[in-house]
Amino acid sequence: MARKPSPRRIFVCSCEKTMPNHGDTVAAASGASVAKADQLCRAQIALFRDALTGNAPITVGCTQEQPLFEEIAEDAGFSGEIAFANVRETAGWSRDARKAGPKTAALLAAAAIDMPPITTVAMESQGVALILGRDEAAIEAGRRLADHLDITVLVERGAEVLAPRQTVFPVLQGSVRNAVGHLGQFELTIDAYALPDPSSRERLRFGPARDGATSTCDLVIDLTGGRPLFPASDLRAGYLRADPRDPAAVAQMIFEAAQLVGTFDKPRYVDYDPAICAHSRSTITGCTRCLDLCPTGAITPDGDHVSIDAAICAGCGQCAGACPTGAAAYALPPADALTARVRVLLRTYAEAGGTQPVLLLHDNDHGAALIDAAARFGDGLPADVLPLAVNEITQVGPELLAAALAYGARSVRLLSRARPRHDLSGLQATLSMMDRVFNGLGYGAGCAELIEADDPDHLAEALVETGKPVASRNVSGFLPTAGKRGLMELAFRELHRVAPTPVARIALDRGAPFGGLAVDTDACTLCLACVSACPADALSDNPERPTLRFTESLCVQCGLCEATCPEDAIALVPQLDFDAWASPKKTIKEEEPHHCIECGAAFGTRASIDRVMAKLSDHWMFSGPEGEHRRRVLQMCEDCRVSVVVKESFDPHEADTRRVRTTDDYLREREARKH
């Protein structure tokens, strides 16, 4: 069926004939009007200006001259959408450039997919700075910043600091016991806090010291050379740290500090919905994945949920990648928007004639620069490797990896530094789980791997796949849904549907976001505490009769049911059971209800009441005539039980039952039972 014409205008350029423009392939794959050029940014700029007369969307296959094109569009009053794709470094400047037509079409199509707007968090700094130091380097930094910031210097106990001729800014003594906060809102607890003696002659002498002093400031400048005050300290906004023995590092830090006055907008990297958080219920802890992975300490427990401080969050996204419910969801962009871009990228590549693509996910900081270097100084990326920039590779979760292979990718590679700046354990756990899933479904081993490279030649070597390609298979075209958990479930169902050799069940390691439950039905009393604790509604009851039901596709393996069960009757079973996902709710246990002996209303279970009666049969409080009355009360519903107590003035703890019982009492009761 012929492709419906698109109103979009696409510009492809050979960049002064240093690469093919593949205009015909792009036109066939996109159905758009394609303009081909050799020097679009200079001699043929009129082609671009002419396209600005209307408001039809435009895609330009160049990012180097993006500022120029945007300026021309603004001067022309163009109000339409303009998208830019880096075709040159990712496809054109390559040993495989002649074969990169499908890839070029895919890159241009993916660039045109709109991403949701970025929300921000405002942080305000008045320039109040605390410099921490151990010697004259801290004093010198204070002098250089005094014209820009409100400076206080705190030197360590015993520091050798010359007495100033004039007090331009305070110099205090102390050691930081604890520090919290971020740009504009730091609070430090200081021990051994002391003021200098004004009579200090050669070196500063300090007066009596006290512990527990509090200091608040907008910036913390750390020149102690010791341990940082914060985890992942280079990601803490407003905390600047340098080795005092490195003059270049100190100078760079001073320059940065001088700029940190005013209001700064920081992206809100993670959206959080406490309603579906599986962290805790009734003080019992369940899921701690985000707490375990956050490198900055931005996530803290907060009752039944967690709290994410957007001002401290550095955007690594490991919390969102690991969150099984979607309570923590990455917002730059959301998972469904990123998956939609992957869908268009892979689908366009296939429609343009490409086969067996490799999806290469990278960040703009390190990955884009390495790809650029490979294009300029090496062989460039292979024609079947489709790069896609994400904010952080650690934001990638199981849903995106599953969707990529369902959409037709041969494999997924994630590009990081050879020495990652921060822990990648969350991402590595996800890759390990997905490797087991892909291998189990017949896609092959090594379909999702991490490339740790700082050298373009190393990157090129890592992209050479020596394994056998996956055999041709069906490809899914599902549309991503909003909400991580729903998207994850849909992606895995489609991954299974189009798998080369689908199987019904794949065992996973503990900590996986999917699984079932092993319930000891003999031990289960149907108290249904697990139903109340389950944050995902995987466990449910039946209002008509005592029943415990389970929906495996909803289970996030948070462990709250396991920890809550008073009988220790529940154990987690991490797995992917596609047959169970396709089945209706499973009834785990069901019993006849007990009916009140007074009004007939159903309450509890017959078995549980029978067990209680059996356990109390030999207890002295439930023996004899008075005990019989008490046993009857236990078999009544709550309303009838209250009625009996009120109307008959029945007191189960009346004085006679509380007196000290003697041997004669037991003998009399035994004789009474004989007769």
Image (cartoon, rainbow, N blue to C red):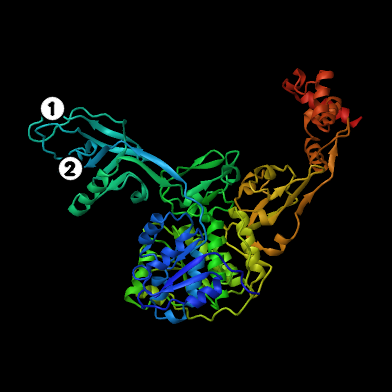
Give the quarter of the image for residue 604: top right
Amino acid carrying mark 1 in the image: Pro
Q: Position of residue 641 (x, y in %)?
A: 81, 27
Query: Residue 314: percent from the left, percent from the top?
Result: 41, 50
Q: Dividing the picture into quarters, in which one does residue 130 lie?
A: top left
The CA span between labels 1 and 2 is 23 Å
Residue type of the residue flagged with mark 2: Arg
Image height check: is 147 above or below 629?
below
Name the residue tied to disc 1: 198
Nearest to the observer: residue 668 or residue 257: 257
Which mark identifies residue 577? none
Where does the image place residue 306, in percent across and percent down from the top left?
52, 42
116 left or right, relative to 517: left
Q: Residue at x 52, y 57 (%)?
A: 114
Q: Which residue is mark 2?
A: 144
Q: Is residue 658 above or below residue 503?
A: above
**Residue 501 in view of the camera:** yes
Q: How many marks?
A: 2
Q: Nearer the viewer, residue 575 or 245?
A: 245
Q: Looking at the figure, which quarter contains the N terminus?
A: bottom right
Considering depth in this image, is 56 or 83 the residue closer to the camera?
56
Q: Is 521 above or below relative to 379?
A: above
Q: Residue furthest right?
A: 675
Lower position in the chain sequence, tag 1 or tag 2: 2
Residue at 60% x, 54% y is 482
Callout 2 secondary element: helix
Q: Position of residue 613 (x, y in %)?
A: 81, 37
Instruction: Tell me the SS state at disc 1.
Output: loop
Label 1 neighbour load within 10 Å: few <14, some 14-19, many 20+: few
Q: Is residue 98 depicted above or below 440 in this figure?
A: below
